[in-house]
Amino acid sequence: MAAVLLRKLLSPTASSDSSAAAPPPLWPLLSPDGQAALKAHLLAALQSDPPKPIAKKVCDAISELATLLLPENTWAELLPFLFRAASTPEAPNPQESALLIFARLADYIAESLLDHLMTIHNLLASALAHPTSPDVRIAALSAAVNLVQCLPTNADRDKMQDLLPAMMRALTDCLNSSQEASAQEALELLVELAGAEPRFLRRQIADVAGAMLQIAEAAQLEDGTRHLAVEFVITLAEARERAPGMMRRLPQFVGRLFQVLMQMLLDVEDDPAWHTAETEDEDAGEGNNYGVAQECLDRLAIAIGGNAVVPIASELLPQYLSAPEWQKHHAALITLAQIAEGCAKVMLKNLEQVVSMILNGFQHPHPRVRWAAINAIGQLSTDLGPDLQVQYHQKVLPALANAMDDFQNPRVQAHAASAILNFSENCTPEILTPYLDGIVSKLLVLLQNGKQMVQEGALTALASVADSSQDHFKKYYDAVMPYLKAILMNATDKSNRMLRAKSMECISLVGMAVGKDKFRDDAKQVMEVLMALQGTPMETDDPITSYMLQAWARLCKCLGQDFLPYMHVVMPPLLQSAQLKPDVTITSAESDDEIESDDDSIETITLGDKRIGIRTSVLEEKATACNMLCCYADELKEGFFPWIDQVAPTLVPLLKFYFHEEVRRAAVAAMPELLRSAKLAVEKGQAPGRDESYVKQLSDFIIPALVEALHKEPETEMCSSMLDSLNECMQLSGCLLDENQVRAISDEIKNVIIASATRKRDRSERTKAEDFDADEGELLKEENEQEEEVFDQVGECLGTLIKTFKASFLPFFDELSVYVTPMLDKTAEERRIAICIFDDIAEQCRESALKYYDTYVPFLLEASNDDNSDVRQAAVYGLGVCAEFGGLTFRPLVGEALSKLNNVIRHPEAQHADNIMAYDNAVSALGKICQFHRDGIDAAQVIPAWLGCLPIKDDKIEAKVVHDQLCSMVERSDAQVLGPHSQYLPKIVSIFAEVLCNGKELATDETTTRMISVLKRFQQTLPPDFLASTFSTLQPQQQLMLQSILST
């Protein structure tokens, strides 16, 4: 006990009451003599070979003190003492203690041991082979594993490489002498090594993985031992960043592992409790191995991918499906469901085979097999959707509908309803509508079934079907809604809490599907029930709380501004949920104080030397509430104004809430919505006593916080969302941003570009790994695509800053240009983004941008003929901008620009769907050259060529610009545009006719009016037969429209 108390005094931690600070550490308060005495006393206590439990606590105290003193080099006696003790096999207990301390201190001493690596190596080799003590061997293994992880370079780790056989022997010796508890300790250490330093194992991977699979296959061993061996191989498969592709090189091992996992799935019995269960998550009859196998199949498929896994599955699944035992059929169907996410691309190529395997399971006599088949369809609807829905709806939906008739087996019925939910989530109304009559009527029958689990399944399915079929659901509204309201009003018993919660979900989704007019009367009744419920105290684990938060938000979406009177009821509890503090327990990773790990609602993670336990249910409620706040702000716009002062201080700090990604995501999405709400309320006079200074104040609160959060954000995808949100906030704030904020944003954009480039560089390093393969390349490509999304948002943010501040932003751009210019030589997406940034500068800053032409315009000219159509589009658009604003600076480049534009316009596939946007922009740029550089071109050739390309129809923005430009030229009777003897007039009339026939698509209202005036002028000034012959070349519809216009 004295050793335990001493350790706590040396390194005190704050109590769980977070308001109390940790007491000061004892060590600095001791006199030098006291410090020396304590150090000597601790080492002497260990040398005296105390009983094991005491020795362990003394080790803890020594390790704790050493972590304070070793960095300061103030415990010179410690390492020599440890070396001596660890090299004394005849005193196994002190030897074990010394090795355990080595293991704990590896991080602190690795650097100082580099000069003595071979000494350590030999010491560990000898301890790993201790003749009598398995405890010494395990302690040596622990020291070896920790040291390998702490060594700074691969070369240093290689010096330890030949310890691996001895490390593995430490494990097999324990197994051979039936010491499974020690073997499990050894396995846990090796799993840690596989996760942290997989490449250390690479040279001997076949031996190591082979040994682990032998353990996994040994049915006589304890389940826990086998599970750890499986965990080791899966961990290696998952070590993509450190050893990409390594396990895929060993298909025979993947095959053996897959076989072990499928056999483990047979650990399931037909327990009567499964059939009579009250809830869907009742897993009676499933043994220890079953759950482990399920999780590991999922992880294996995700880690190794379909190309490696599907061939193995294709061999094993038919064997299982042709066997007489129901357990094997069940295992095969569960396997298909578990591997679908990781193997989706490959499974889609064999979809017919997969679907028929599963649908055969629907006919199996055993209900647990039918349940597994339904489960597989549900999972595949998510993982292989929407392809599965599009190609097999005519087989799958009738099969699920039949399964809902299985009244002998409520578990099967309920699961069929749940699978309808998965199927319809990835389904278009067109696919679903023909089946609605049958599905809705069956679900209504299930709603009236006595079994609560079946009713809950039916409610969830109805909600999803309504959500997917939208307007088509109106037909069923009058039949369905009375049942839903009856459940909401009558299911008041504690045992019916989930049923009532799901009725709220279903009512609100049905309301959203059919719309406000149909739902209005029932909505009032429903909201009265919810208001009454809101006022009653609820237990913390009551699911109604979370479902009610979501139902209110959906009702708001459905009713829009009509919802405002209910906000005073909804907001207080919603804010309370959004402000929930995370329920976190922190202990030392090494301590014996176990967090209640059997509590499902607590998730534990180990960070460094701390173990953190987090209650997930609290986080989920918080995330739901934050999402709902975002929903209300988005839906109610200025109507949300009264709540901004409470919501902004709640959500802004959550931009850095690292316990839960969904909370951060909701906070990020809410930022522009809050600003928009404030801005609209002030503009529309709905913010009493507030003016623009309020919007500025809110913007000053939100934008710096977003920039700071972006700086610390660990997830690439979230960085994109943050940039997107920041961009919207900047657009809303406009010139309210001050110079310091613009500088902070520019600096952060610089950081984002550098961080992204670093991540890409690290990935390209991974391509040099020995086992890198095509599957790994595919995964890297997906990661790099996320990176391009980040760059895309960077481009959008810079575009907004340039449009807002124009030339006054250029000093900031000059600092950024060293990061932007290199993008012109990178991937197509980066080239496009860099060109778009320059396009914005040229367009918004006009003469101030001329100084950049020398750098950027050569890139525009080259990129005008790029292989990538998006790059071409950005480049030719830029040439148009430079033609318009570049004046004399652009003049010498006109000839080359014409030639590049001509290549785009005359390309044989120019008007193909992929190329049409680049084509339209090239035509627009050509028009600008005709307008602004007429004297630098051969107008007699270029202008008719330009007219021949009009009208343009796909890029609606450019179409409006070009057609307005043509109209202006004709209005001022531009002789070269009308042509010698007005010979281009018929072409111009046909262009106008086609533009006018397209309504507002291709021209603004103002341009349309001007075009009509021009045509009327022609009618009055041109000979009638000239007009008649021009009209005769038009399509009948265009002739009719012109006649109608000209006759009014």
Image (cartoon, rainbow, N blue to C red):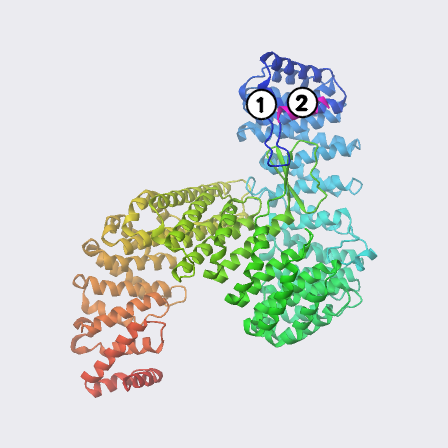
561 or 979, nearer to the observer: 561
On the image, which quarter does residue 44 sit in? top right
Placement of 32 over or under 962, stated as above or below = above
Rendered location of residue 823, percent (x, y) = 37, 47
Q: Amino acid at mark 2?
A: Leu
Rendered location of residue 856, percent (x, y) = 29, 50
What is the chief secondary structure element of the magenta stretch?
A: helix
The answer to whether residue 973 is left or right of residue 563 is: left
**Residue at the spot 19% in from the left edge and 86% down from the top edge:** 1023
Q: Quadrant of the N terminus?
A: top right
Q: Nearer the viewer, mark 2 or mark 1?
A: 2
Q: Amino acid at mark 1?
A: Leu
The magenta region covers: 1-11
* Distance Cα–Cα, label 2 vs label 1: 14 Å
Residue 6 marker: 2
Disc 2, SS: helix
Disc 1, SS: helix
Rendered location of residue 314, percent (x, y) = 67, 56
Residue to which mark 1 is pinned: 68
On the image, which quarter does residue 882 sit in? bottom left
